[in-house]
C-alpha cells in the first residue's frame, strides 16, 4: 500500500467510497458528463457521485482536478527541470515567485542532499532549448537566484495518473 492509500485508509472510507476514489484517481472519462459515467461503473447515481466528490473536497481528500497536457503533441518539444539553491530564509518567497510563472508546471521545495545543494525544483516546457534557457534567465532575474542548473529531459519512461485502491476496479459491495 502506497503512502496515499495509507492516508485514505485512515480516513475510514467505505467500500463504495473506495470504488469512487479508484474511479476518480485515473483519467476521467472524456465525456460531457464524466461523473455520470463513473456513477454507472460503480452502481451509483450521478448526483450521488457529485455529492461524494463534494464531501471528499470538504474533508480535504481531493484538492483539485487537473488536466495533463501531452506536451510533445502540443508543440512543446523541449522541457527541463531547473533546480535552484536558495537560503532557507529565501525559499518561501522564491518558491511563490517561481510557482506564479505561467510556464512553470511544477514547483517543489525538497531537502538538500550531500553533494546536491538544490532545494527548489521547477519544471518548464517550451518549443525549443533556447526558449528554455531564456525562461531560466528570466526566473533567475525574478528571484535573484544565483545558484541553479538545468536538467534536460532526455526520455520519458512513464507518465500516468496515480490509481488508488486497484482492488476496487470491480465493485462488489452491493451483491
Image: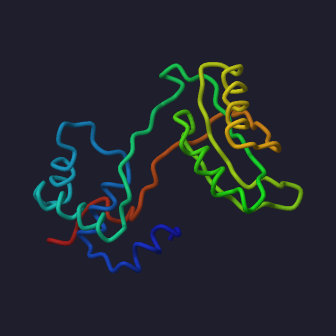
Q: Residue at x 68, y 36 (%)?
A: 139
80 in relation to 34, above or below: above
166 in relation to 26, above or below: below
Image location (x, y in percent) of residue 150: 76, 36
Quarter of image, res 142: top right
Q: Residue at x 45, y 69 (%)?
A: 5
- The quadrant in which the C terminus is found is bottom left
Q: Is residue 167 left or right of residue 173?
A: right
Quarter of image, res 122: top right
6 in relation to 170, above or below: below
Residue placed furthest toward the right? 115
Task: Pick whichever, 28 or 51, lies toward us.
Answer: 51
Q: Is residue 61 left or right of residue 14?
A: right
Task: Pick whichever, 13 or 98, lies toward us.
Answer: 98
Image location (x, y in percent) of residue 81: 68, 40
Q: How many marks?
A: 0
Quarter of image, res 17: bottom left
Image location (x, y in percent) of residue 153: 69, 34
Task: Pick whichever, 2 or 166, lies toward us.
Answer: 2
Image location (x, y in percent) of residue 115: 89, 56
Q: Residue at x 66, y 29 (%)?
A: 135
Amino acid at each position: 500500500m502506497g503512502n496515499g492509500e495509507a492516508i485514505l485508509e485512515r480516513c475510514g472510507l467505505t467500500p463504495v467510497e473506495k470504488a469512487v476514489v479508484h474511479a476518480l484517481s485515473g483519467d476521467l472519462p472524456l465525456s460531457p458528463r464524466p461523473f455520470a459515467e463513473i456513477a454507472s461503473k460503480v452502481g451509483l447515481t450521478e448526483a450521488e457521485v457529485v455529492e461524494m466528490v463534494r464531501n471528499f473536497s470538504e474533508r480535504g481528500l481531493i484538492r483539485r482536478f487537473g488536466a495533463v497536457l501531452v506536451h510533445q503533441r502540443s508543440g512543446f518539444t523541449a522541457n527541463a527541470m531547473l533546480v535552484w539553491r536558495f537560503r532557507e530564509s529565501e525559499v518561501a518567497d522564491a518558491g511563490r515567485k517561481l510557482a506564479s510563472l505561467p510556464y512553470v508546471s511544477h514547483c517543489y521545495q525538497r531537502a538538500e542532499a550531500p553533494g546536491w545543494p538544490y532545494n527548489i525544483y521547477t519544471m518548464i516546457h517550451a518549443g525549443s532549448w533556447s526558449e528554455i534557457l531564456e525562461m531560466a534567465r528570466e526566473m533567475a532575474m525574478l528571484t535573484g537566484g544565483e545558484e541553479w542548473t538545468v536538467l534536460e529531459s532526455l526520455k520519458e519512461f512513464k507518465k500516468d495518473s496515480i490509481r488508488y485502491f486497484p482492488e476496487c476496479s470491480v465493485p462488489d459491495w452491493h451483491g
